[in-house]
Structure formats: structure tokens, C-alpha cells
Image (tube, rainbow, N blue to C red):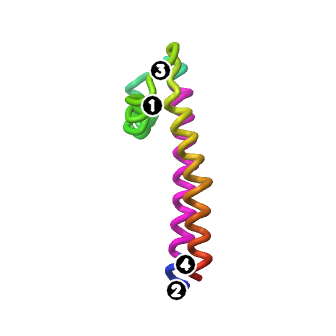
Amino acid sequence: MFVLANFIDALATVINILLGTYVWVVIGRVIISWVNADPYNPIVNFLYQVTEPLLSRIRRFLPSIGGLDFAPMLLIVAIIFLQRFLVPTLRQLAQTIG
């Protein structure tokens, strides 16, 4: 049972790190959108490829208001919710198992 508890705790840690990193990727994407960045730049291309699938899904339900795109903000709020709900839940599950 300790192996499963350690696995779930490690999984919670990895999920937390990945979600935190993705928040910074979304913030980078927002900053890139404010400047006239070269779309052929590999970093800009990476930021768009990694964030656009989720942002486009959010934009289907949340149109831009007055030319402002609130999709990145909503995505960041959703990620923070997952960090505050999913990660502690997994850690508590690991504690009850182990």
C-alpha cells in the first residue's frame, strides 16, 4: 500500500508542476500577443501550438468583449482551481492509503 500512496503523491507533485508551468506558458502567450512577434520564431510557434487548442475551445463559449480576449484569464483561473482542488485531493488520498 505504501507504493501506491507514494505513486499518488508523486503524481500529485508532477501534476502541480505541469499545471504551474502551463500557467507561465499561457502568460508568455499573452505577452507575445501584445507585441508584434515573428510568427516563424520557434518560441512563438511553440507558445501558439501549446496554448491554442485549449484557448480556442474556451473562445467558442466566451467571445471577446470589446476586443479583449478573456480566454487566457479563464484558462489560468481553471488551472489554479485544479492546482487548489485536484492536487490536495490526490495528496490526501495518498495519506489515507499510506
Are discs 2 and 4 less than 8 Å apart at CB? yes
| Among numbered discs 1 and 2, the one appearing first in the sequence | 2
Magenta segment: 7-32
Q: Which residue is mark 2?
A: 1
Q: Secondary structure at mark 1?
A: helix
Please name the amino acid that badge 1 sits on: Val
The residue that disc 3 covers is 64
Q: Who is closer to the viewer here, 64 or 38?
A: 64
Say whether residue 63 is visible.
yes
In terms of image quadrants, where is residue 39? top left
Q: Residue at x 55, y 64 (%)?
A: 12
The type of residue carrying mark 4 is Ala
- Left or right: residue 43 versus residue 76 is left
Amino acid type at mark 3: Ser
For mark 1, what is the residue? 44
Disc 3 from disc 2: Cα separation: 49 Å
One can see residue 42 in this view? no
**Alpha-carbon distance for marks 4 and 1?**
39 Å
Which is more foreground, mark 4 or mark 1? 4
Q: Residues within 10 Å of mark 1 (few under 14, many from 20)?
A: some
Disc nearer the start of the sequence (3/4): 4
Q: Nearer the viewer, mark 1 or mark 2?
A: 2
Residue 60 against residue 64 in the figure, above or below: below
What is the C-alpha distance between the residues marked 3 and 4? 44 Å
State the residue at coordinates (57%, 63%).
Answer: 13
Q: Quadrant of residue 91?
A: bottom right
Chief secondary structure of the magenta span? Answer: helix
The earlier-in-sequence mark between 4 and 1 is: 4
Estimate the spatial distance between the alpha carbons at disc 3 and disc 1, rounded to whole Å.
22 Å
